Image (cartoon, rainbow, N blue to C red):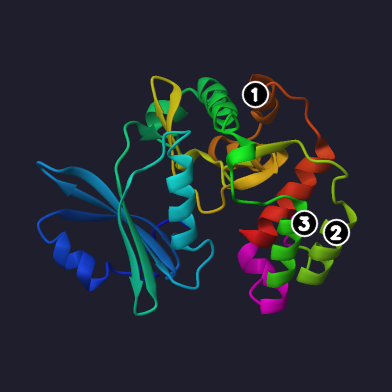
Amino acid sequence: MALNGETRPLRLPDSLADEYSEWSSELVWQVESSAATYRLTHPSAGVRFAKVKSDDDYPGLPAEADRMRWCGSHLPVPEIVDEGSGSGLAWLVTRGLPGRDATHEEWSADPVRLTRALARGLKRFHSAPVADCPFDFRLDAALRHVRSRVDSGYLVPERDFHPEHVHLDVTEAVALLESTVPTAESLAVCHGDYCPPNILLDGWEAVGFVDLGELGVADRWWDLAIATWSLDWNLGPGFEDLFLSEYGIERDDRRVSFYRLLYDLVS
């Protein structure tokens, strides 16, 4: 969610605020009052990012830290400096990576070139070894997660659904999801939220991946459906087919529809 003046962001926990008292702190991202990310800058020690979340927020920061540690052996992801929890909050501090995120005007000024770069970046991400990945988001796991969220009563369509799905209530959305489950999966290590803010570019190539809390083995269309959808949000319509062509795959409308609805039910 974009920063706004109506929502008070989570503050850095006192222990982190004390530790980084000599660093400048800038709020760079927030989701209502349940999550926030700060850029911490020091003239000699560089840049770090501190992510703070309510400890019941999904995906949780301990799970994200586990995924980052695994992924660091295979792909460029942030190095963890510190993590912890207390008083209803969890936090994760990482070193900054090179590059600028894919929403920066340096990249968005050339949306065709940006689309191709993002597609190559996803193909690189999907090169991580499926057999070595301990995190599972294949269909059975995904559907269990949907049912858990429904049972919790957490989902509210007008808050959690994109315009394509807001006409559905939760019961209708789950029924539609379960009636359109793909019959096969093309497995890859998926990012889980592959969109421009989470991809760092340098020289028109992906050099870093962030926000890995939903990483796991899944059908590659889990990423492809959301990656192409996010182009519409960030660049406007007309770039989805170019992305798929650069990635090297033909569009599968059934899978796209399924995984976009799944995204609204789990993210």
Work out how far the residue at label 3 is from the one at label 1, CA to CA, in angstroms: 26 Å
Compare marks 2 and 1 and give the one earlier in the sequence: 2
Check if residue 160 falls in the magenta segment.
yes
Residue that carries the numbered disc 2 in the rendered image: 178
| Callout 1 secondary element | helix
Work out how far the residue at label 2 is from the one at label 1, CA to CA, in angstroms: 28 Å
Give the residue displayed 70% in from the left and 71% down from the top.
Answer: 148
Which residues are the magenta region? Answer: 149-166
Which amino acid is tagged 2?
Glu
| Callout 3 secondary element | helix
Label 3 CA crowd tier, 10 Å (few <14, some 14–19, many 20+) = few
Question: Which quarter of the rendered picture does the C terminus lie within?
Answer: bottom right
Residue 140 badge: 3
| Callout 2 secondary element | helix
Q: In the depicted view, which residue is nearer to us: 43 or 69?
A: 69
Residue that carries the numbered disc 1 in the rendered image: 247
Which amino acid is tagged 1?
Tyr
Find out whether the residues at labels 3 and 1 contact each other: C-beta distance under 8 Å.
Answer: no
